[in-house]
Image (cartoon, rainbow, N blue to C red):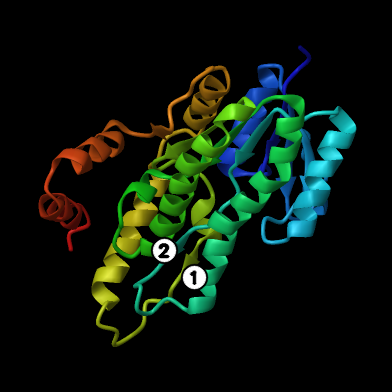
């Protein structure tokens, strides 16, 4: 078989760029997406195509472009996403809608666009980039956790619905990695006089410190490469520091209140 054709949403920076660059070195033909390719005229890691996960027409156009150029599409990596922080009570609802449109509805629209081609060619792979944060409700990151948790559940359901088509669907759940996600994250403002002011400001500093000291995103790229080469990949594939992955095991075995206490201690709340 010829080189596998890979489409990565959000491929111009961060984890998506690392995955695309790594897969290119392994012989894959990679297409990354960005909302505005004109901002990346010097980008030469792999080809970038225009795609906005909030625009269904742009999704259809990007997928059609790749299929027209290559005749097939073997791997979709749903990576595009945004961060959001803030007290649930004080987060503007338009920002809640935006993060769900980007992190949840967007990946669904992209999967809907590629599934007919994958069925037609008799197989393919979809890897949804979720997050370790999606396995728990984190304080002041509740909406981000909710979007990634919801995408993880969709992954579980879609695996079963497509099992007869030769399509493997799985997720890779990164922990904290040193990327530029913080620069694009929506932060609800720390409001003077708010009941949440001190605890939110304190947690926000801890979140940013965790990202700044995070691991090399090449670890996620290596995990994705491994998943692509597996005939029967696991549903859930957490990637990150030992303690972050171990926290998922603890959540399964500890009583809810005990696990909640561990999170409260971690964030000093």
Q: Front-most of 168 and 142? A: 168
Residue at 53% x, 63% y: name it: 99
Percent coordinates x, y for residue 244 in the rendering: 29, 39
**Left or right: residue 125 compared with residue 232:** right
The residue that mark 1 highlights is 96
The answer to whether residue 42 is visible is no
Taking depth in this image into account, of 76 and 225 the one nearest to the observer is 76
- Vertical placement of 66 versus 134: above or below? above
Within-10-Å neighbours for mark 1: few <14, some 14–19, many 20+: some
Residue shown at the point (54%, 38%) measured from the top left: 161
Tell whether label 1 touches label 2 (CB within 8 Å).
yes
The vertical placement of 256 against 185, above or below, is above
**Percent position (x, y) of residue 23?**
65, 24
Query: How much space separates mark 2 and mark 1, taking CA atoms?
Result: 7 Å
Does label 2 or label 1 sit earlier along the sequence?
1
Quadrant where the N terminus sits is top right
The numbered mark at residue 53 is: none
Instruction: Point out the residue furthest to the right here.
Output: 68
- The x, y position of residue 260, in whole percent, is 17, 55
Q: Position of residue 153 (x, y in %)?
A: 43, 47
Give the side of residue 211 with respect to residue 78, left or right: left
Q: In the displayed structure, would residue 150 be above or below residue 203?
A: above
């Amino acid at each position: 078989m010829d080189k596998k054709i890979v489409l990565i949403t959000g491929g111009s920076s961060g984890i998506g760029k690392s995955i695309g660059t790594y897969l290119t070195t392994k012989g894959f033909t990679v297409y990354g997406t960005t909302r505005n390719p004109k901002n990346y005229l010097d980008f030469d890691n792999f080809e970038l195509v225009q795609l906005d996960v909030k625009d269904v027409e742009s999704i259809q156009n990007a997928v059609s472009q790749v299929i027209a150029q290559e005749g097939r599409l073997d791997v979709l990596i749903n990576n595009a996403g945004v961060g959001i922080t803030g007290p649930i009570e004080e987060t503007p609802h338009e920002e809640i809608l935006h993060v769900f449109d980007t992190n949840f509805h967007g990946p669904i629209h992209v999967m809907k666009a590629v599934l007919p081609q994958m069925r037609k060619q008799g197989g393919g792979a979809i890897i949804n980039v979720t997050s370790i944060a999606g396995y728990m409700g984190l304080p002041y990151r509740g909406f981000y956790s909710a979007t990634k948790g919801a995408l993880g559940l969709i992954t579980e359901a879609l695996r079963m619905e497509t099992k007869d088509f030769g399509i493997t669907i799985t997720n890779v759940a990164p922990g904290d990695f040193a990327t530029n996600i913080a620069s694009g994250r929506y932060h609800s403002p720390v409001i003077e006089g708010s009941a949440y002011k001190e605890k939110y400001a304190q947690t926000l500093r801890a979140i940013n410190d965790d990202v700044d000291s995070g691991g090399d995103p090449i670890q996620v790229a290596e995990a994705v490469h491994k998943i692509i080469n597996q005939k029967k990949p696991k549903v859930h594939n957490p990637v990150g520091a030992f303690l972050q992955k171990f926290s998922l095991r603890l959540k399964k075995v500890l009583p809810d209140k005990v696990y909640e206490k561990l999170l409260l201690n971690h964030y000093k709340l």
